Amino acid sequence: MSGENPHGGSSGPISFHIVDVSSTRTADTDESGGRIANAVEAAGHRVEGREVVPDDIGRIQELVRKLA
């Protein structure tokens, strides 16, 4: 059937939160995150948020836990 995925339920937009791991970029200079956001939205999905987190395992884990 059209509009249904093989795992049950209907297919539709997916919500994303983009996480860029970088110790040199900021939200203003994060070009790759912007490109990813544009691609997600062009595919009909939603970007719920974007974060730039330093290349620090503790900070990355903290953010992933918060977003899960």
Image (cartoon, rainbow, N blue to C red):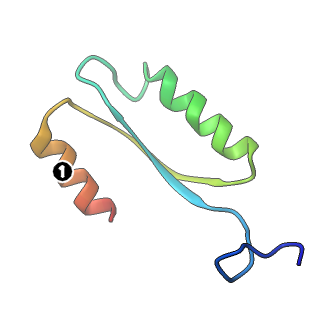
- Crowding at dot 1, Cα within 10 Å, few <14 / some 14-19 / many 20+, comes out as few
Q: Is residue 44 left or right of residue 55?
A: right
Q: Is residue 14 left or right of residue 63?
A: right
Q: Residue at x 69, y 82 (%)?
A: 9
Q: Is residue 48 left or right of residue 55?
A: right
Q: Position of residue 18 (x, y in %)?
A: 45, 44
Residue 3 figure quarter: bottom right
Label 1, secondary structure: give it: helix
Q: Is residue 33 left or right of residue 4?
A: left
Residue 37 figure quarter: top right
Q: Residue at x 15, y 43 (%)?
A: 59
Q: Position of residue 14 (x, y in %)?
A: 62, 61
Judged from this view, the residue extending furthest toward the left is: 58
Amino acid type for the residue under numbered disc 1: Gln
Quadrant where the image shows the N terminus: bottom right
Looking at the image, residue 39 lies above or below residue 22 = below
Judged from this view, the residue extending furthest toward the bottom is: 8
Judged from this view, the residue extending furthest toward the right is: 2
Question: Mark 1 — residue?
Answer: 61
Looking at the image, residue 54 lies above or below residue 64 = above
